[in-house]
Amino acid sequence: MSTTIQTTPEERKLGFRVLFLGMFAIGTGQTLFIAVLPPFARGLGLVEMQVGFIFSLSALGWMLMSPFWGRKSDFVGRKTIILLGLAVYSITTILMGIEFQLNQGGMISVSTLFVLLILTRGCYGFLGSGSHSASMAYVADRTTEEERTGVMAVMGSAFAISGIIGPGLASAAVLLGPLVPYYLFGGITALITLLIWIYLPEKTKPEIPAKVHQVRLTAFDPRILTFALMGLFISQTSAVIMQILSMYLQDKFDYSNTDASVYTGLMLIFTGIATLIIQLGVVRKFSPTPGILLRLGSIATIISLILIILSKDLYLIAIAMAIYGVGGALMGPGLFTGVSLAVGKNEQGAAAGILISSYAAGFLLNPLTGMSLFTWKPDSPYYFAVLLMIFCFIIAISDKRLNKKVEYEEGMGHSGHAG
């Protein structure tokens, strides 16, 4: 049995703050790959399917390795896996900027660039995919069941804030040069990684480490199958909206590469603001059940998709993206809280890893689904996403476990960790 060194409330509060920054770094970096990379890569001669495949190996890595890193964090501790993920994210983001620069300098061809981008992004998927699941497990370790939804919402709000700040930074940086955002976001992540290494407390390893190796949790476990399916549907919808948005605006309104990046960043700001308001002002305050969050989130997302299809100008798309932010703000905490409460204390990392894996599967499939549909007809991926959200809504209604009130156990975190 490991020796426990009690973490003070001040240390724990500081730890949550720097962990929040880690989630912020990941979210901010996603702006780069949503708003900046697709139109720039198209300008270099890559087609839509190739742009999608740049993310495919990374998504495969997330799908295969997130459960592994989640289980690993149950044994070696959350902090080690969080640091590994953020460090790899920083390095690969900067490396992609270097690869683009080599192509612009005539040192490598477009085909070579395409392969290098896939491999570099794939490296992040395989080696860096544990940071998110380990972070969610860290929160589950150090919160009671009663307070978990609220804290999960706060961590989720890191993505909302990054959705506000990230697009602004990306838009400003891309005006300085199309490759500046890669070095900027890579550098920011490196700094935050250093802060987490210094200030995130983890004074005890998980309880009964030997039992961790006995855990054989899979996505087909009846306790978490519901969450894995909804994670797949939600992530496929997110991939459709996020990965295609800049190209959708570019084709629909005949924007240049730079204009498409700037306007995509602006749309993401509306998403971020709406997400932040809902997660901090509603989810954290009222802590609804996972079922309520998932049902309302599905409805909001369906409305946003329909508005995108009907849009004739940026104003309606801005409204649609804000409503999409509401949907994401509800469904994210609903899924992560639900899966956390569905499993035992020795399965937190494994369960979080499986959920992240189901999210990655949606992005892995998008080049074959969303991108293929986009090349056929630009609006068709959004009709497909509406269908997925209807399925998600049906599951959220049908699974009666999501409607049960949680029996709270005061005074102890879900895993019994002391710090």
Image (cartoon, rainbow, N blue to C red):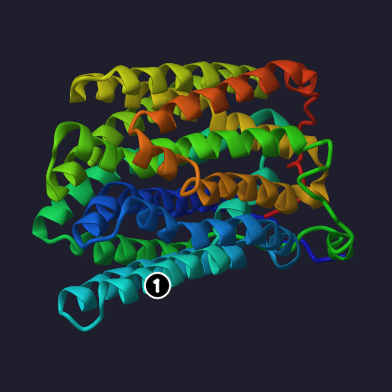
Foreground residue among 271 and 146:
271
Return the residue at label 1: 115
Q: Where does residue 139 sit, x and y in percent of width and height?
A: 62, 45
Quadrant containing the N terminus in the rendered view: bottom right
Left or right, 349 with respect to 164, comes to right
Q: Where does residue 93 sit, x and y in percent of width and height?
A: 36, 66
In the image as oriented, which residue stretches furthest toward the front? 376
Q: Residue at x 45, y 40 (%)?
A: 370
Quadrant containing the C terminus in the rendered view: bottom right
Left or right, 22 with respect to 107, comes to right
Q: Where does residue 249 sit, x and y in percent of width and height?
A: 23, 36
Q: Residue at x 56, y 50 (%)?
A: 360
Q: Residue at x 42, y 38 (%)?
A: 373
Q: Secondary structure at mark 1?
A: helix
Badge 1, how many Cα within 10 Å: few under 14, some, many 20+? Answer: few
Kind of residue at disc 1: Val
Foreground residue among 333 and 102:
102
In the image as oriented, which residue stretches furthest toward the bottom? 107
